[in-house]
Image (cartoon, rainbow, N blue to C red):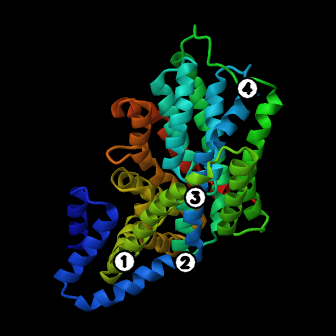
């Protein structure tokens, strides 16, 4: 009955956090278990008191500062001035800039929004078809959840009780492979999606180094994050705090493009966006507790084990199931709900490395950003680029196939998530 109420409430269009709480209350009412209500406040508080979750608002704040101060544009300019003589240089600039932003923002939707506003108009001015530019930019946003720092990795690490630093490291090789595949596809398609008679967009004026140095300074931010974590200098949460200080110094003091009067609005947006994520975690934890109370995880485990005893086949079944789930449910919500159910089966019954399982879950669920009917990233890119959803869905299809290939590589080659 709990599952049925969940589906009914979700079909009404209610926000997923309220769907989870509503399904929980339906169970309490129908099962006549009013005593359970007294445990809910403790479960809710316990779900968000984990110190590692502090990294979420910090990385959200970092992304807001980067956007407001114009630091993201400096990365694009710095890359482009060195590729002026390379064919289809804006395609490469788009991908490299997305890779750099993925190492700063940790949020795919924020990354897609920024790059759709900044790079798509530049590519259109350079003679590229707007739909092609929008499809490439939206697909490159898939790098956000896999290149460290990643919000979805932080949440999985907290739920699965595994090292967040190890999760970040695990995303490097799959993320770079995905980058190469997307770049190869984009360059293959570039020729027939650009007007050959176009003279090209204007290039930055001045010396190359004058345009490059600000971009290199901006790239110090992801280096602080990844380097500090890799060498054990910072925890992921501490690295986010240090990166915020560096971003404030560059944006507000060195380049003086961050208006200090905008800080209250930046903080307001950070609090709002962070509260949405943390409230979702809390609601999912409560719902997960009800599922456990109903022995749903045990039943799911017994059903899956009855299908196969092969770890590879199990992983492929999970990929297929999560692909469907990602089409209808937000990736973070699905991760929070399903990890407590699937992870014990993966590690206990099949001996799968939880880090490998987490990367596969994250990569598969994030595809939901580009697949209707939910497709948050798809709608963002379509709205900001003025391209129809139907056309954009067709344009991102090859990149979705490339992402599936990376998922299969992670399934069959576990060393990819343990490269160091």
For label 1, the SS is helix
Q: CA distance from mark 3 to mark 1?
A: 27 Å
**Quadrant housing residue 43:** bottom left
Q: Which residue is mark 1?
A: 286
Residue 231 visible in image: yes
- The residue located at (63%, 67%) in the rendering is 164
Crowd tier of the residue under label 2, counting other residues whose Cα lies within 10 Å: few below 14, some 14–19, many 20 or above: few
Question: As displayed, is residue 296 above or below residue 275?
Answer: below
Please tell me which of labels 2 and 1 falls first in the chain: 2
Please provide percent x and percent y for residue 91: 61, 28
In primary-sequence order, the first of circles 2 and 4 is 2
Based on the displayed image, in which of its 4 quarters is residue 197 positioned?
A: top right
Q: CA distance from mark 3 to mark 4?
A: 31 Å
Q: Residue at horizontal 21%, vertical 57%?
A: 12
Q: Which residue is mark 3?
A: 61
Element under disc 2: loop
Please state the horizontal and vertical placement of residue 177, each as a whole percent of the image. 64, 44
The residue labelled by disc 2 is 50
């Amino acid at each position: 009955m709990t599952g049925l109420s969940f589906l009914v409430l979700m079909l009404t269009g209610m926000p997923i956090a309220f769907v989870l709480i509503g399904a929980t209350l339906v169970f309490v009412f129908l099962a006549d278990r009013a005593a359970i209500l007294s445990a809910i406040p403790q479960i809710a508080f316990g779900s968000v008191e984990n110190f590692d979750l502090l990294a979420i608002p910090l990385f959200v704040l970092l992304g807001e500062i980067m956007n407001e101060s114009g630091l993201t544009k400096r990365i694009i300019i710095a890359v482009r001035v060195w590729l002026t003589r390379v064919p289809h240089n804006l395609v490469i600039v788009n991908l490299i800039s997305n890779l750099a932003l993925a190492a700063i923002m940790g949020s795919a939707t924020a990354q897609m929004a920024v790059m759709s506003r900044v790079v798509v108009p530049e590519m259109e001015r350079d003679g590229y078809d707007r739909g092609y530019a929008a499809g490439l930019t939206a697909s490159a946003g898939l790098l956000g959840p896999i290149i460290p720092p990643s919000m979805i990795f932080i949440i999985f690490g907290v739920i699965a009780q595994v090292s967040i630093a190890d999760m970040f490291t695990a995303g490097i090789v799959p993320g770079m492979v995905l980058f190469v595949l997307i770049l190869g596809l984009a360059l293959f398609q570039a020729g027939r999606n650009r007007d050959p008679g176009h003279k090209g967009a204007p290039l930055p004026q001045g010396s190359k180094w004058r345009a490059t140095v600000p971009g290199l300074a901006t790239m110090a931010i992801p280096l602080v994050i990844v380097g500090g974590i890799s060498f054990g200098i910072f925890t992921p949460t501490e690295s986010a705090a240090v990166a915020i200080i560096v971003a404030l110094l560059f944006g507000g003091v060195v380049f003086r493009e961050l208006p200090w009067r905008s800080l209250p609005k930046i903080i307001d947006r950070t609090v709002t966006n962070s509260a949405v994520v943390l409230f979702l975690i809390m609601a999912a934890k409560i719902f997960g507790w009800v599922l456990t109370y109903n022995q749903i995880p045990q039943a799911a485990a017994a059903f899956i084990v009855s299908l196969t005893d092969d770890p590879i086949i199990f992983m492929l079944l999970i990929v297929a199931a999560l692909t469907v789930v990602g089409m209808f449910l937000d990736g973070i919500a699905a991760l929070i709900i399903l990890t407590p159910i699937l992870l014990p089966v993966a590690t206990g019954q099949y001996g799968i490395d939880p880090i490998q399982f987490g990367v596969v879950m994250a990569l598969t669920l994030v595809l939901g950003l580009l697949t209707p009917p939910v497709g948050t990233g798809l709608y963002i890119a379509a709205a900001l680029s003025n391209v129809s959803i139907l056309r954009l869905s067709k344009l991102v299809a090859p990149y979705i196939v490339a992402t599936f290939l990376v998922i299969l590589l992670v399934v069959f080659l576990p060393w990819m998530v343990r490269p160091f």
